[in-house]
């Protein structure tokens, strides 16, 4: 199992990258006090003659390590980190992009890039995201490749230092750094490496929970940011993974129709990072407003890393735009009988618009402003701005107010476990699922039928109750399917061996998977009792008022009905 940590010897420190591809590394030793190795997949992105600065420091007097140490300091430079290799130009490009399209806040003090310049870790991560933005926008890192890889290496060094002195207090910072590396790899086509980052992050969080079971459970802004960044990152990686497979299958199907000798790709055949990146650039052009919306989202993505502009708690928001995005995705999945690869659904851009909406809602929830930018292609036209309705007496929004983490967590579970459209159909890592399910529980426990009683954030309307049921039932489905899958595999997981620090199984407030599933089933059961809805047909109608597939396959329909039946039997 890949783990994060340092080798406590004079050898090269263990990094997230060489955990994944330890057999594809070049060992390096030199005068630098810390050498971080880069995967060969990264080296291919460097221009000829620019590999050596990241491999060796002892034979090249002009190496990056020596330049970074020997470069003269700028007395007028107030930035908290070194900015070599056109880093300032890269930051300026990123800053100007947002303002040229008017997709950032009118209040400059709340622009995530303005906030980033005061935090060394946020600024470095922002530069990595800026490099991805430039790569997607132009098709190549080009003049900024050295700056990009310099800051990537420095981020890996930061992670190694944090892991070497790991503590619950530093866990939040470490999570953000690893999520950025994970996001970076996925955007450059290194999906397998991105998944290894996620695996290592789960192991790291398990280790932190042994020291402090409440790690990441705080209500402070930093913990909230870290939990949100994990949610959006894992969803992005799983979407990229499925999008890539759908694109390959569709391309192979088109080739097969023109050539009888063409062979369909094997599910085990993963494209190289370079091939994956080429395909990304292809679908950016094919997908409806795909590139434009992705570039907009990347410009706002540093808001997950930067200090919150507002000292107050994050605001709830109207879930209507997210639910509409899920309805568009669901409508595409309902057409899988005529498009078994699912590529058409991705090409229509619904998942991309959903991603943009979530990124914008995140930034808005911490803002003092009441405006968000709609993704291009959504109702209302591109680049329009809408005013968030925060009037508690307005039934158009109050009925569907939600926390960002709650709706994002359920969205990921719905797309994976109900629509089977993300992560290539592979099961979720139970450790990841546990954390996602806990985010849903944090959201639903404050609503009617929750353990803490009613909340003023939601009325007793039918639509509000339907949304609450949808969140609880989707989570119960995800947990039940995951448990069944690993039971069939007879693999030892935290289903069969709950982690001691997560809570004792069956404990009322246990944080282990069996306890979470039991509480979710109990919530659905209480909803059924209070509403008088007993049959699956009536329950499905309530779910459909939120979002639900109209044409589930026979097997899936039996699974959903089976979960409902278990809930009902448990209450008798």
Image (cartoon, helix red, strand yellow):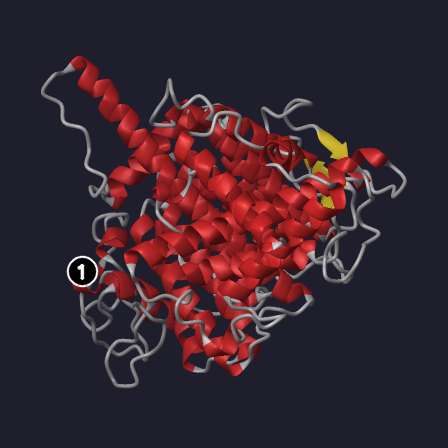
| Side of 333 relative to 229 (left or right) | left
Residue furthest to the top in view is: 258
Residue furthest to the right in view is: 393
| Side of 311 relative to 258 (left or right) | right
- Is 464 in front, or is 258? 464
Q: Mark 1 sits on what residue?
A: 24
Q: Is residue 191 visible?
A: yes
Classify residue 104 by image quadrant: top right
Q: Residue 237, percent across and down?
A: 41, 47
Q: Is residue 91 visible?
A: no
Q: Residue 124, percent across and down?
A: 49, 60
SS label for mark 1: helix
Q: Residue 420, percent across and down?
A: 42, 38
Q: Is residue 273 above or below residue 479?
A: above
User: Where the N terminus falls, by quadrant?
Assistant: bottom left
Residue furthest to the front in view is: 572
Q: Residue sitting at 77 percent across and 52 percent down? A: 448
């Amino acid at each position: 199992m890949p783990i994060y940590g340092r080798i406590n010897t004079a050898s090269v420190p263990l990094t997230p990258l060489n955990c994944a591809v330890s057999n594809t590394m070049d060992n390096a030793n030199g005068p630098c006090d810390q050498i971080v190795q880069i995967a060969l997949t990264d080296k291919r992105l460097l221009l000829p003659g620019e590999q050596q600065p990241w491999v060796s420091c002892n034979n090249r007097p002009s190496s990056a390590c020596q330049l970074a140490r020997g470069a003269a300091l700028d007395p007028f430079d107030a930035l908290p980190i070194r900015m070599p290799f056109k880093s300032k130009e890269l930051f300026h490009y990123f800053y100007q992009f947002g303002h040229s399209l008017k997709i950032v806040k009118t209040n400059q003090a709340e622009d995530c890039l303005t906030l980033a310049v005061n935090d060394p870790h946020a600024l470095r991560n922002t530069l990595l995201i800026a490099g991805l933005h430039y790569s997607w926008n132009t098709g190549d890192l080009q003049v900024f490749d050295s700056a990009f890889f310099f800051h990537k290496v420095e981020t890996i060094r930061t992670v190694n230092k944090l892991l070497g002195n790991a503590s619950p207090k530093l866990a939040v910072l470490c999570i953000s750094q690893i999520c950025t590396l994970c996001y970076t790899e996925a955007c450059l086509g290194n999906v397998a490496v991105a998944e290894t980052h996620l695996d290592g992050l789960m192991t790291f969080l398990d280790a932190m929970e042994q020291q402090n079971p409440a790690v990441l459970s705080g209500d402070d802004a930093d913990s909230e940011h870290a939990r949100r960044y994990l949610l959006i990152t894992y969803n992005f990686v799983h979407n990229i993974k499925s999008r890539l497979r759908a694109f390959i299958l569709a391309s192979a199907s088109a080739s097969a129709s023109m050539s009888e000798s063409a062979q369909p790709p094997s599910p085990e055949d993963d494209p190289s990072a370079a091939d994956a990146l080429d395909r990304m650039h292809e679908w950016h052009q094919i997908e409806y407003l795909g590139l434009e919306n992705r570039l907009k989202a990347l410009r706002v993505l540093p808001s997950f890393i930067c200090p919150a502009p507002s000292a107050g708690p994050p605001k709830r928001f109207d879930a209507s735009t997210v639910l509409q995005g899920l309805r568009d995705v669901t409508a595409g999945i309902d057409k899988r009988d005529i498009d078994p690869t699912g590529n058409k659904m991705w090409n229509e851009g619904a998942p991309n618009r959903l991603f943009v909406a979530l990124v914008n809602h995140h930034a808005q929830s911490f803002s003092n402003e009441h405006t968000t930018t709609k993704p291009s292609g959504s109702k209302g036209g591109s680049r329009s701005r809408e005013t968030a309705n925060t009037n508690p007496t307005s039934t158009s929004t109050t009925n569907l107010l939600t926390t960002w983490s709650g709706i994002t967590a359920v969205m990921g579970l719905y797309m994976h476990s109900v629509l089977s459209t993300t992560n290539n159909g592979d099961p979720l890592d139970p450790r990841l699922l546990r954390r996602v399910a806990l985010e849903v529980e944090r959201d639903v426990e404050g609503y009617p039928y929750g353990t803490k009683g009613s909340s003023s954030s939601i009325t007793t309307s039918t639509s509000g109750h339907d949304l609450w049921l949808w969140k609880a039932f989707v989570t119960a489905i995800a947990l039940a399917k995951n448990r069944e899958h690993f039971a069939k595999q007879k693999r030892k997981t935290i289903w069969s061996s709950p982690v001691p620090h997560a809570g004792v199984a069956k404990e009322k407030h246990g944080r282990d998977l069996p306890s979470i599933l039991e509480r979710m089933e109990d919530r659905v059961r209480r909803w059924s009792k209070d509403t008088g809805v007993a049959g699956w047909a009536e329950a499905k109608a309530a779910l459909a008022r939120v979002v639900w597939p109209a044409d589930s396959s026979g097997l899936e329909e039996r699974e959903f009905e089976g979960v409902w039946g278990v809930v009902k039997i448990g209450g008798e």
